[in-house]
Image (tube, rainbow, N blue to C red):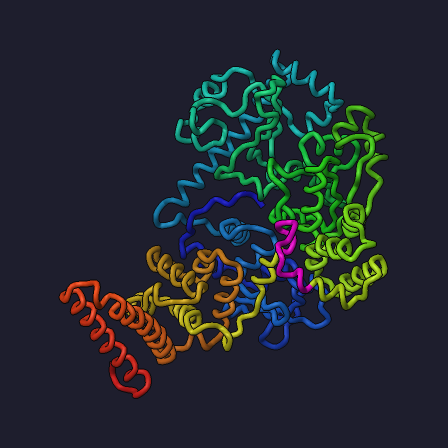
């Protein structure tokens, strides 16, 4: 996934896409459909990987919505494409607009057009600059020094070309002068991620070996750079900051260069720690190597890899930091059902060190040593803890718990527990009991026990949600009513956090004149709440014309809020009776009388059927 360019699309764009494409047409490009009468079914691509015995994924072209009765996933063609292609909502709109032949209309405030225009300029700027850096590497005197450094590290000319390596001149004024002459404005250059924000136009990259970062479409979107002054005061590596076209957590260095390899049958992604490791692995014949960019491996990057393969080889540095990165990556990948293997190099700290000292064949042979993610962690923790002691067994299991708890397959988990029962000489029931106790504990990997997806797919049980959320779901379905009901119920009247979030979203939708369900859903950032609202769109009880139910719930929420305010006011009157003036006390008593009157009117309306 590339960094999304935010900006609201017009309702007209969404409607045109919906008119030109049916949901079933979009879904059929990914999974087989099973029409039964007027209803279309499919085997769910989300929780069953399309391998369900009985289709549970219902597709309704009349409403443009789908719902899975197995995992409770629901949505429309836009959310379907978001999930299947690992795209943001704006990217899904652009993807479907291109498929449908729809011209994207700018949002009413012009921000979307402005950002798209700026992004187009940045794509052009980065592509042009990358060519200039490549030219500098091959043709300038400073570039010759950089080539010498590459030769010392035994990087071949073929890899220099494949990864389009370059050189940024040492001059601190060259970059600004060069780009200004090409017609780029200061406004664009300041948001380009190429210059210091505090000392513009001081360049981020000077006298550095340049590694261009490409998105999955091959567009240069950022740079990673290695210092060639070898000064102890200069940072060895600098990476581009996030910009309109780039975000670290959504991209991987070497992904684009690995795409051909990933298309091969039974391909496995090789996850390394640094740029030189990626290039070294490609040079040794492992053409699916990639690495995160100046940050630890993230769940979003795992989602990006899952678009191409479900198998990953981990090969981080052998030092302590590298091993911690390995632990975390195992957890993240395992939680997303990847088949993970860990490779421990013996001839050097990392791939680039082995390539430089021993050559590509030695690296290829050293890489062959591997173990599964589970076995790797077990062996590591067996060395850390004395499992001959009760405390050692407890600490061992606690360390392994995040991995075990993120195992989706019950069969797989049972196999692990049986194995641990033998290794630790502890019964299966005891292990299961400790796992449950550890479930609520802080997980060691940070992102291993990733409950986001599970929360997003939590079914909407209308009988168990709060009255606050029920009312907001009705208003989400009948958004034309919100302008009226917002005068009867305030944000502060709500107690349910999800209801408060939805109230804010309704306010934003009213302000920005959002009319389509697709755009409304795009305003909700919480996955679970978005799925609740999406599911409610399929349920008649939230779309019914009779507003009596909504009136009753709103009145009850309002009554609850007024009674709480009265309780606070009553306490204030008791506590302050001897500390404030007679006039102030009279004012408090008068306010309480007004609350009493309003509460009595609401109670009459609710319980006696009288007009308020």
Tell me, yes or no, if residue 487 can be seen here: yes
What is the quadrant of residue 581 in the picture?
bottom left
Image x and y of residue 289, in percent: 72, 38
Secondary structure predominantly adopted by residues drawn in magenta:
loop
Q: Residue furthest top?
A: 141
The image position of residue 98, as x and y in percent, is: 53, 49
Q: Quadrant of residue 284?
A: top right
Estimate the x, y position of residue 180 in percent, counting from the top left: 43, 22
Q: Is residue 596 left or right of residue 166?
A: left
Q: Residue furthest left?
A: 583
Residue 341 visible? The answer is no
Quarter of image, res 53: bottom right
* Residue 485 picture location, percent across and down: 31, 69
Above or below: residue 85 compared with residue 612: above
Which portion, as a residue range, is magenta? 436-449
The residue located at (46%, 60%) in the rendering is: 521
Q: Does the magenta-highlighted stretch encompass residue 421?
A: no
> Outermost residue toward the front?
578
User: Relative to the observer, which residue lies in front, 182 or 197?
Assistant: 197
**Compared with residue 608, is residue 523 higher up or lower down, i.e. above or below?**
above
Q: For residue 440: magenta?
A: yes
Count of marks placed on residues: 0
Placement of 388 over or under 550, stated as above or below: above
Q: Is residue 206 left or right of residue 495?
A: right
Kindly identify the residue that appears in the image at 59 percent across and 21 percent down. 208
In which quadrant of the rendered image does the C terminus lie? bottom left
User: Camera-side residue: 132 or 431?
Assistant: 431
At x 58%, y 43%, the residue is 249
Q: Say which residue appears at 50% left-offset and 28% top-offset.
A: 194
Q: Nearer the viewer, residue 89 or 452?
A: 452
């Amino acid at each position: 996934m590339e960094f999304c360019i935010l900006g609201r699309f017009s309702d007209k764009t969404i409607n045109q896409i919906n008119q030109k494409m049916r949901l079933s047409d979009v879904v059929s490009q990914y999974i087989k459909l099973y029409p039964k009468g007027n209803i279309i079914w499919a085997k769910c691509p989300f929780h069953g990987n399309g391998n369900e015995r009985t289709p549970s994924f219902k597709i309704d072209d009349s409403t443009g919505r789908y719902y899975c009765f197995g995992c409770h996933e629901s949505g429309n063609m836009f959310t379907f494409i978001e999930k299947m292609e690992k795209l943001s909502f704006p990217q899904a709109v652009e993807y479907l607009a291109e498929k449908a032949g729809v011209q994207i209309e700018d949002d009413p405030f012009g921000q979307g057009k402005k950002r798209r225009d700026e992004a187009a300029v940045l794509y052009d700027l980065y592509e042009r600059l990358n060519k200039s850096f490549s030219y500098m590497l091959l043709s300038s005197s400073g570039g010759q020094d950089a080539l010498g450094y590459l030769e010392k590290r035994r990087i071949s000319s073929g890899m220099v070309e494949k990864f389009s390596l370059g050189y940024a001149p040492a001059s601190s004024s060259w970059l600004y002068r060069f780009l200004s002459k090409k017609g780029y404005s200061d406004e664009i250059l300041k948001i380009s991620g190429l210059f210091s924000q505090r000392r513009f136009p001081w360049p981020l990259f000077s006298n550095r070996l340049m590694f261009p970062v490409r998105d999955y479409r091959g567009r240069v979107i950022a740079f990673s750079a290695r210092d060639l002054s070898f000064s102890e005061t200069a940072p060895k590596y600098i990476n581009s900051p996030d910009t309109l076209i780039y975000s670290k957590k959504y991209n991987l260095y070497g992904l684009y260069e690995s795409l051909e390899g990933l298309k091969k049958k039974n391909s496995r992604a090789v996850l390394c720690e640094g740029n030189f490791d990626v290039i070294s692995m490609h040079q040794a014949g492992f053409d699916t190597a990639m690495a995160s960019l100046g940050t630890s491996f993230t769940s979003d990057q795992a989602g990006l890899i899952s678009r191409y393969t479900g198998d990953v080889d981990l090969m981080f540095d052998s030092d302590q930091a590298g091993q911690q990165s390995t632990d975390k990556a195992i957890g993240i990948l395992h939680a997303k059902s990847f088949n993970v293997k860990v490779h421990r190099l013996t001839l050097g700290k990392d791939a680039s060190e082995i390539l430089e000292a021993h050559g590509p064949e030695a690296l290829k042979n050293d890489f062959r040593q591997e173990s599964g993610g589970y076995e790797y962690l077990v062996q590591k923790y067996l060395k850390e803890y004395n499992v001959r002691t009760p405390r050692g067994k407890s600490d061992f299991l606690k360390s392994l718990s995040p991995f075990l708890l993120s195992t989706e397959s019950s069969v797989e988990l049972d196999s692990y527990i049986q194995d641990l029962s033998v290794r630790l000489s502890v019964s299966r029931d005891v292990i299961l009991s400790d796992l449950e106790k550890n479930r609520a504990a802080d997980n060691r990997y940070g992102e291993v026990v990733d409950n986001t997806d599970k929360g997003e797919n939590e079914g909407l049980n209308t009988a168990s949600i709060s009255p606050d959320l029920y009312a907001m779901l009705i208003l989400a379905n009948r958004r034309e009513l919100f302008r009226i009901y917002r005068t009867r119920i305030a944000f502060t009247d709500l107690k349910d956090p999800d209801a408060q979030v939805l109230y804010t979203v309704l306010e934003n939708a009213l302000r920005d004149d959002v009319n389509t369900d697709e755009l409304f859903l795009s305003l909700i950032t919480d996955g679970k709440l978005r799925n609740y609202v999406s599911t409610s769109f399929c349920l008649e009880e939230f779309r019914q014309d009779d507003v009596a139910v909504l009136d009753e719930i709103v009145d009850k929420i309002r009554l609850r809020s007024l009674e709480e305010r009265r309780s606070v006011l009553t306490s204030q009157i008791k506590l302050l009776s001897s500390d404030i003036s007679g006039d102030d006390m009279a004012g408090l008593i008068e306010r309480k009388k007004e609350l009493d009157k309003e509460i009595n009117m609401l109670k009459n309306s609710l319980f006696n059927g009288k007009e308020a």
